[in-house]
Every structure is written in C-alpha cells, then in structure tokens.
Amino acid sequence: MTRSELPLHRRTITVSAYREGDGEISVEARLLDERPWAEPSASVIHSMALTARLRLADMVIVAAGADMRTFPHAECPLITPAFDGLVGLSVAAGYNRAIQERFRGVTGCSHLYELARVLGPAVVQAGISANAGLRMAGRPSHDPRATAGVLNSCHIWAPDGVGLRKLDAGWRPGTGPRPVPELGTFEGA
C-alpha cells in the first residue's frame, strides 16, 4: 500500500475544561475539519464549538451553546439553538441515549452531535480532576464514589472492579504516581 504525504482529510477534536467558581465547571469542545490539499481559502470545511457549564455535585448541564464559525451551507447555523436542549441533562446515566434522541440525524447536525458525544466523557474526567484538585488543596470535595461517572465505563470501574476496591482501600484520585499502583499496595497500607 502506498500513501500520499498529504492527507485527504484531517479532523481535529479538542476539549478543554475550566473551573467556574465554586461547584461548577465549563467545557468547550471544538471540531475542525480540513482538506490539507485545498487552497488555503477553501481548506477549512467545518469549524464548530459546543460549550456547556455544569454543576459538579450532580454533573447536570446548567448552560449550553453551539457556535458554527465555518460551515458549508448558509443554513447550517439554523440548527445551533437546538443544542440549548443539553440544559438539564446529566452527563451520568442516560446521557448518550438522551443526546441521540435530541440531536442525531435530521433533528441535529452530525458535527455538533459528535461534539455532544465527546462532551460527556470529557466532563466526567474534568469532574474527577476538579475534585482531585480540591483534595490536594485540602478543601472538601465530593465523595469519589458519588461523582465517579466512570462507573461501568470499563473493566476497572465495574461494580466489583479494582477501581472501587482501591477507593475503599484508601486511594484518592489525583494522588500518587501514574499508573496508579496495584490494589495490593493500598490494601497493605
């Protein structure tokens, strides 16, 4: 197989999260579709952003907005108000089903839907990071079990998985080396 040095298409998705005062975070997801081979004035096909503000206590979206900066059809931005429908959703249980019902297919935009999909797991990680930062600063944080939107997300976070057993044995997310040591390290402490 031979490959050209210049890609036909490049999609970049970035997600950034920020602390917003006590008990809230904001998250911005961006999507950029480019045709690297095209003339510079025509190389960007899509440049879009989806933002959300959430309460850490229950991981519920309290504000949301979509923005299209570059898009192929003049009518594309008409769908952005639909993404205000993220408000009130929890990124925990049922999030994926809820966004599919609201934004997938002809009721949404495939690109903004993709950003809504990546927003959920990124928010969970941001919540974990926010709580770890609070603990490291000696401030009260939410119980790691209560805000662990990672439950049932992989073999580590199965109901009987090693992640919960490490928490029970005294490990606190955001502390210690990476990777987190094996369970026996905490059980012997």
Image: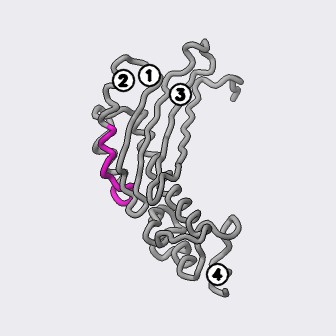
74 sits to left or right of 16: left
Residue occupied by mark 2: 76
In what quadrant of the picture does the N terminus appear?
A: top right
Residue occupied by mark 1: 71
Q: Dot 2 lies on which element? A: helix
Residue occupied by mark 3: 33
- Disc 2 from disc 4: Cα separation: 53 Å
- Disc 2 from disc 3: Cα separation: 15 Å
Comparing marks 3 and 1, which lies closer to the viewer? 1
- Identify which amino acid the numbered label 1 is placed on: Phe
Give yes or no for contact between labels 2 and 3 (Cβ–Cβ under 8 Å): no
Q: Dot 1 lies on which element? A: loop
- Disc 4 from disc 3: Cα separation: 45 Å
Q: Residue at x 55, y 70 (%)?
A: 139
- The vertical placement of 171 against 116, above or below, is below
Residue 102 placed where, x, y %?
Answer: 29, 42
Residue stretch in magenta: 83-94
28 sits to left or right of 40: left
- Of the residues under marks 2 and 3, which one precedes in the sequence? 3
Comparing marks 2 and 3, which lies closer to the viewer? 2
